[in-house]
Amino acid sequence: MRKRHFIFAGLGMLALFWLSGATPALAQSQEELAKKLANPIASLISLPFQQNFDINYKPDGGFKYTLNVQPVIPFALSTKWNLISRTILPIASQNNVTALGSMQSGLGDILQSFFFSPAQPKGGVTWGAGPVFLLPTATNESLGGGKWGVGPTIVVLKQSGPWTVGLLANHIWSIAGDAERPDFSLTFFQPFVSRAYKGGFSWTVNTENSQNWTADAFSGSLNVSVAQVVPVFGQLVQVSLGPKIAYGNAPVRSHWGFRVNITLLFPKK
């Protein structure tokens, strides 16, 4: 039942934004917006609600639902530089993941990234770099690491015509927190490729990979998705969905799953 509550909560938040009466100006084509959404540090305010359904967890065949609320807010520091804030706030519910018959739900650890990026790309190449922070906000110890973390993050991508190819990566070291929880040294890297089409349709292929050097555990997933930008009740929205195929040697991980992402767009008028 808790899993359903989280799903309904996510849909409820979406409904509130739809009914807010915001009506963006269609100064940019849906194709341009789809292309901007392929860029993690584009100068575009967006609010994704990313729903992940991870199925058949090792070793007890568990299930995990995670709603990631991921606001992206760019700031113009000058005519030459932007600062892009990217936040990931996870809300999760899981069954039979930590042990057979177990169930946990609540807030996970918040990941906050800041990218300093040139305002104008050169030769179609865009890059951004800055700090990333992990905040131990989990309401259940099974949903977070119990440690504060900090490290560097970087994204590099090239856009040519409708194509976007790039890499997002970060590394986080634990620096403080619950002394009884293990320290960690985590590397995350996400290569991606995307193509946008007229009318706002696009597809994306990426892999999301995480290496815990302290525990010598690796996990990742191959993600394929199709997306469409559409106006809904006056609000521009991108809806995407697709399968996830998991891999790695982490002792606790899913075998497969799927993702549904609903992103509210707020382009400049």
Image (cartoon, rainbow, N blue to C red):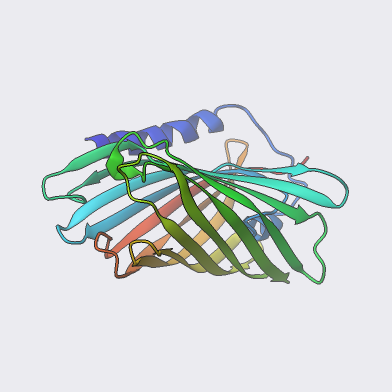
Q: Residue furthest left?
A: 101
User: Can residue 38 be seen at all in this image of the molecule?
Assistant: no
Quarter that holds the C terminus:
top right
**Direction from residue 176 to residue 238 in the image, left or right:** right
Using residue 127 as the reference point, say whether residue 176 is left or right of it. Answer: left
* Residue 10 figure quarter: top left
- Which quadrant of the view contains residue 156? bottom right
| The residue positioned farthest toward the front in the image shown | 179
State the quadrant of the N terminus. top left
Q: Nearer the viewer, residue 69 or 33?
A: 69
Q: Nearer the viewer, residue 19 or 99?
A: 99
Q: In the drawing, does residue 138 fall left or right of residue 75? A: left
x, y percent for residue 4: 28, 37
Residue 86: x, y in percent?
59, 46
Instruction: Please provide percent x and percent y for residue 105.
Output: 28, 37
Residue 36 visible somewhere in the drawing:
yes
| Front residue of 9 and 187 | 187
Closer to us: 172 or 200: 172
